[in-house]
Image (cartoon, rainbow, N blue to C red):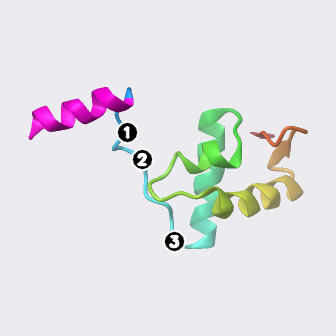
Amino acid sequence: MTEKRGQSEMSTGFAEPTDKPAWPKSIPDQVAAVRDALGDLGEGTPEQVARSFKRGRAPSVLPLLESMTALGLAARSGDGVYRPTR
């Protein structure tokens, strides 16, 4: 079985990290997780932030980033990249 997995990894060029946290269920936990992920990334698009989580989706991350921007916790550049402000 490991041989088959190795072939799959070779054909895609990279192995998917398995240590990603699951997408939180509650809104407060989602906000905290997006804040932490954005801090770890330094900056990122909703798609990049969503890829920090298992089952993370950009359409779920975007409103959280917009809310964080309204609260002064993040800033958005003209090209849709967000960065933490604190």
Q: Residues within 10 Å of mark 1 (few under 14, many from 20)?
A: few
Point 72% across, 61% down: residue: 64
Task: State the residue in front, 32 or 75.
Answer: 75
| Amino acid carrying mark 1 in the image | Pro
Task: State the residue in front, 58 or 12.
Answer: 12
| Residue designated by label 3 | 25
- Magenta stretch, main secondary structure class: helix
Q: Is residue 4 toward the left or the right of residue 53 in the image? A: left
Q: Is residue 7 magenta?
A: yes
Q: Position of residue 57 (x, y in %)?
A: 58, 58
| Amino acid carrying mark 2 in the image | Lys
Disc on res. 20:
2
Point 66% across, 50% down: residue: 35
- Badge 1 marks a residue whose secondary structure is loop
Q: Are circles 2 and 3 on residues that touch, CB within 8 Å?
A: no
- The mark total stands at 3
The image quarter in which residue 84 lies: top right
The furthest residue to the front:
11
Q: Earlier in the sequence, mark 2 or mark 3?
A: 2
The stretch in magenta equals: 1-12
Q: Is residue 40 toward the left or the right of residue 68 in the image? A: left
| Residue designated by label 1 | 17
- The answer to whether residue 26 shows anywhere in this view is yes
Q: Are circles 1 and 2 on residues that touch, CB within 8 Å?
A: yes
Q: Position of residue 86 (x, y in %)?
A: 77, 40
Q: Are circles 3 and 1 on residues that touch, CB within 8 Å?
A: no
